[in-house]
Amino acid sequence: MSFFLDSVVMFSTQILFFLGGWVFFIRRLYKDYEVHHIIVQLIFSLTFALSCTMFELIIFEILGILNTNSRYFHWKLDIFAMLFTVIFVLPFYIAYFTLSNIRFVQKNRLIVVLTVAAWLIFVYFFWKLGDPFPILSPKHGKIALAERESLQRAANATPKQRGIWGMIKNVTGSSGKESISQLQQEVNAYEELSRQLFLEVVDLHNTKERIIYSRTLQGKYFNFMGYIFSMYCLWKIVISTINIVFDRVGKTDPVTRGVEIAVNYFGIQFDVKFWSQQISFILVGIIIVTSIRGLLINLTKFFYAISSSKSSSVIVLALAQIMGMYFVSSVLLMRMNMPPEYRGIITEVLGDLQFNFYHRWFDVIFLVSALSSMGFIYLAHQQAPEKNMNP
Amino acid sequence: MAAIDIDKVRILVVGDSGVGKSSLVHLVCHSEPIANASWTIGAAVDVKVHEYKEGTPSQKTYFLEFWDVGGSANHTKSRHIFFNPVHGLILVHDLTNRKSHLNLRKWLAEVLAKDSNGAKIGSNSGSEYDPERFAGSHIPILVVGTKMDQIDPRRESVLSRSSPVAEECGADEINLDCMQSKDLAAGTSKAVKFSRFFDKVIERRFFAKDPFQSVSTSSYMYTDRRRPVAPQYISKTCHQD
């Protein structure tokens, strides 16, 4: 009987999450686009709902809500559904919509056959990728140089030597026999200049807005939080480096560590069991909320930047794939942040995985991406920031 | 450079990003489809020579300047520099994307707010289209729907419905495919509509003292929601050059 009640609770929360994803899709992502295929919306909301359910189950694990067996059952169910979505459904539909966009493929049957072929290739490579694990050498990331290329093109087109003075010379000393192609060249140069000036104006407006915002209370609060989080990022980079260099894996999670320090060094006496539950609940809750919110905000920004009305379906599905994979891996890594008594269910559900290896692997990837992000941002700020050509 | 004695009018082409404004302007000015369309940054200007009142004794040559303003969302705060002065307005939407049509109201509000108040930076009042504000400034408007060839056959009913935005402003409406030059060949109904619109813009700019004596009375199709313009609003219009 309790299992039935628990299932009702779980399914009603899942429906809530599904609706949340649906609304987010309509209101934020597809603000300027029309939904041509409702299946895209369904899949996105489904992925979002399954991810949130996983996090919800972790919270329930910590707080001890619901029966253990029903929790375990729902864990298994959710993980299988999530894997099915991420490995089967999403790549299939991504391939389908990409192939539909190509003009010369007209008949529907042909598209379906090609989609199945593409999906088989994807699954093969996905499987092959996991073969060498748990031991694999880190791969290097690719670097995109689109901004530099457009800037170089613009610099070549502008005749910097002639410029304004050349124009004035032409006006005063010309005999009226200007060739059209010469004029056209000058016009092109001026248009390029006006585009660059416009981009600088845009950047100045943005800077002005940021300055105004930073004076408001909300702006100050976010600024302060920014400092705190940069401290946290620095600490995390240092810890990852130490972990990799000295080849150790953090055995204890922050909660138990904090409690140990508090009890041993500061001599504070309190009910360890009760408080560690509360603290880990708060910590895990914060991690979950910030990662969901951060991911959705970044997805939205990314979507606005690169989508057009033709490619919007494919991009949304790709983003849903990233979202699903990201949430699955953060559940796996969440284990590291929880005291041992709560890790049990994740260990049980995920079966026989070498968790230590994956934690170390995460450190490596984190370090690589942190360093490359720093490199990007440094390069981007080297050139004058207003030359960022973002359409 | 010799001074050229031909007057010109400014026509603004606005719409969401990616609907086909640059393709449309290229088609109108050069009578051939654009070769490679890329996102417009800022504004791109193209010029067309137009014969006002062609075929009549009072025929005169004018330059039409098409200001194709990039519709990217990042540039909202800086676009207003292109909006003043404007003598004609073309609102472009994508027939395959209904949202781009709904956003035309926002575009109309943005252009009208900047036009009547000069360069007002950072105003948020232009987020909702207000028919009252439109009644005070009478810029001729044309609504163009693009990508007609890409409409899903099941949704062709969208072509038969007239656009609600066009009805509200009393604007003419054209649906076309910007990649087909035959759509705008001389003599076709769409080319005639464009010609009529250009004539109306030139008329409003150079000849009309009292806007009620315009070329066609169809430009004042009022619905029941609004009241007709009272004469005291007309004195507001002074297009400075």
Image (cartoon, coloured by chain):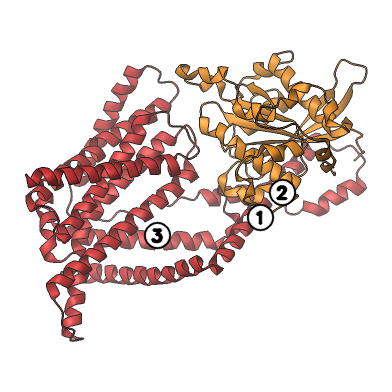
Chain colours: A red, B orange
User: What residue would you read off at disc 2?
Assistant: B81
Counting residues from the N terminus, which is met first, the one under dot 1 or under dot 3? Answer: 1
Left or right? Give the position of B240 relative to A279: right
The residue shown at (47%, 16%) is B153
> The numbered mark 2 sits on a residue in which chain?
B
Task: Tell me the distance, in whole angstroms, between the alpha carbons under discs 2 and 3.
Answer: 38 Å
Work out whether residue A161 can be spotted: yes
x then y, percent, for residue A113? 29, 22
The residue shown at (21%, 50%) is A54
Quadrant into which the C terminus of chain B falls:
top right
Element under label 3?
helix
> The numbered mark 3 sits on a residue in which chain?
A
Left or right? Give the position of A6 relative to B195: left
Discs 1 and 3 lie in a common subunit: yes
Front disc: 1 or 3:
1
User: What residue would you read off at disc 3?
Assistant: A372
What's the residue type where badge 2 is placed? Ile
